[in-house]
Amino acid sequence: MKNLILFFLTLLVITSELKAQTTRASDGSRADVQAKIDLSSDTDIVTIPSGSFTWTSTVTISGKGIKLQGAGASKVLGRSLSTVAFGASGTKTFTTTVSGLAIIAGDPLRIYRTNGEYGGGGGFGTGNGIWMDCTVTSYSGTSLVVSVTSASPTGTGSYEVWSISTRPSTRTEIISNTASLIEITEDVSNSVEISGLDFVAGTSNGYLLTLNPTTNALPVLIHDSFFSINSNTSVLDIKTNKGVIWNCTFISPSISPAPLAIHHKAPGLTVSWATASTMGAADTTGKSNVYVEDCWFVGWLISSDSDDNARTVFRRNYYDHAGVGTHGADTSTYGVRHFEVYDCTFYHVNLGASSPNITQWFYLRGGTFAISDNVIPALDTSGNWGSPATFKMTIQNLQRDAGPFGLWGDNISGNQVPAPRQVGYGNPTGASSVLDPGSYAVHGVLEPVYMWNNTGTGSSTVSLSDYATPTGNQDSVTGYIRAGTEYYNDGTAKPGYTKYTYPHPLRTGATPSAFTSSLLGKIKLSGKATIK
């Protein structure tokens, strides 16, 4: 009898935990997608069919952990260095840099000229993308033969360095003609999940997706999606310190200083500077950092900017002519808290004067970080754009009169090393330091930067850069960011550092509680319905 009572109590718990999940099929219009979201409850799925849909106002997901799911998305598969004549028709042959790409005859592809059109001045692009839509005629070894069906823009010319992307006929394409396409607020019960969507910036000039924080909420999950922008649009505006993004492609039409794939700025989370680091395995729950993994970035001067209070992890990504950046307490108030980049591959090809001007692989303005086990080539352009460094570190407000700490130092007693929340400083133990009226650490505590076990011809190049040539009593960055004190690039690994579990556990979905997990293999419950 006791066993029977225990069984029914267990069944009751499982039933309450595994709430019936409803799938609501939208017609793809902005109005109907929003209506289906409004009708939904936690764990429900809102689907968008294949096709192309233009949205001219914002879709909002707030107060419920639902899934917004498209029918499929494009994805970059590989590269070609072939010099090929651009055109809207005809047969083209590309040699892929590796064999065995997931391509078969009859597949639809979109082949982009990596970084779009050059010629915008200083080695930057014009903002115009260059691509050809085509159908695969044959693919053997590294020889890819395609039949072109359309192209953009109109014009002629031969170009080199191409990104090869799938273009599935079943994809769901959302064209953004609004400043903010999807606004997401974290939910405390379930993760909001976005997947299977092609996002294209039409006339938009803001962000495609915005992630807003909620106290004690679960991370937003974004995966298996494709993002293509114009020169006025960025992709993700992340205002929280949790989330998982994976298997996504971020493609920019040209190298430009303006757009970002990922802008991680959490101005309301000042606790980030008043608490200990959650780098690596110190993130015991996997919910204290934003994780970006197994993604492909194509054609970004700075693909990501970790800014106020951000804790970001980039791992196992592919950076195809795409750099990484951070903000300090200069034009921003707080600056990045910490970030990690590891097990990534960076790619750059020397085209001489036609090379895009990637001014550095990493532009680092504040906080602490760990960069390890990456493949990093030199940014060689045969001298056309100088000699860019891999790691360029700076403290802008030593010479820049901006933000809360403009012209720091300047021979003023007490305003010396360290500058507020500069490179190499954090709060490793959560101990307090000098506080300002906002109750966040001003100077920070020494928490050195470590760069180790990176390979490639550009793996060890460090540059300390002043914002401008110091004048009068202005200090130079060389007195603030010092090898062996604020940073280590001599093979020394970050002490006690272990990488966080890969792949991120949330990628496989929610994990049942320990109480119910032992019974899930025996009791199969299903509460699914489809409502159109």
Image: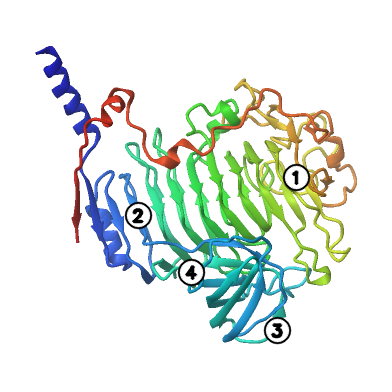
Q: Residue at x 16, y 28 (%)?
A: 12
Marks 4 and 2, how far apart at CA: 20 Å
* Frontmost residue, 177 versus 406: 177
* Residue 83 percent coordinates (x, y): 72, 76
Of the two numbered discs 4 and 3 in the rendering, the one whose residue sits closer to the viewer: 4
Vertical placement of 11 versus 351: above or below?
A: above
Residue 32: quadrant of the picture: bottom left
Of the two numbered discs 4 and 1 in the rendering, the one whose residue sits closer to the viewer: 4
Q: Residue furthest left?
A: 1
* Residue 77 percent coordinates (x, y): 57, 61
For the residue labelled by badge 3, is the local secondary structure a helix, a strand or a loop? loop
**Proximity of marks 1 and 3: CB atoms separated by less than 8 Å:** no
Residue identifier under label 1: 397
The answer, for residue 60, to whether it is visible in the render is yes
Residue identifier under label 2: 68
* Frontmost residue, 338 versus 246: 246
Q: Quadrant of the C terminus?
A: bottom left
Task: Tell me which numbered mark, 1 or 2, is placed earlier along the sequence.
Answer: 2
Residue 169: quadrant of the picture: bottom left
Vertical placement of 95 versus 443: above or below?
A: below
Of the two numbered discs 4 and 2 in the rendering, the one whose residue sits closer to the viewer: 4
Q: Residues within 10 Å of mark 4 (few under 14, many from 20)?
A: many
Residue identifier under label 4: 167
Side (left or right) of 496 relative to 220: right
Q: Residues within 10 Å of mark 3 (few under 14, many from 20)?
A: few
**Proximity of marks 1 and 2: CB atoms separated by less than 8 Å:** no
Task: Tell me which numbered mark, 3 or 2, is placed earlier along the sequence.
Answer: 2
Of the two numbered discs 1 and 2 in the rendering, the one whose residue sits closer to the viewer: 2
Residue identifier under label 3: 157
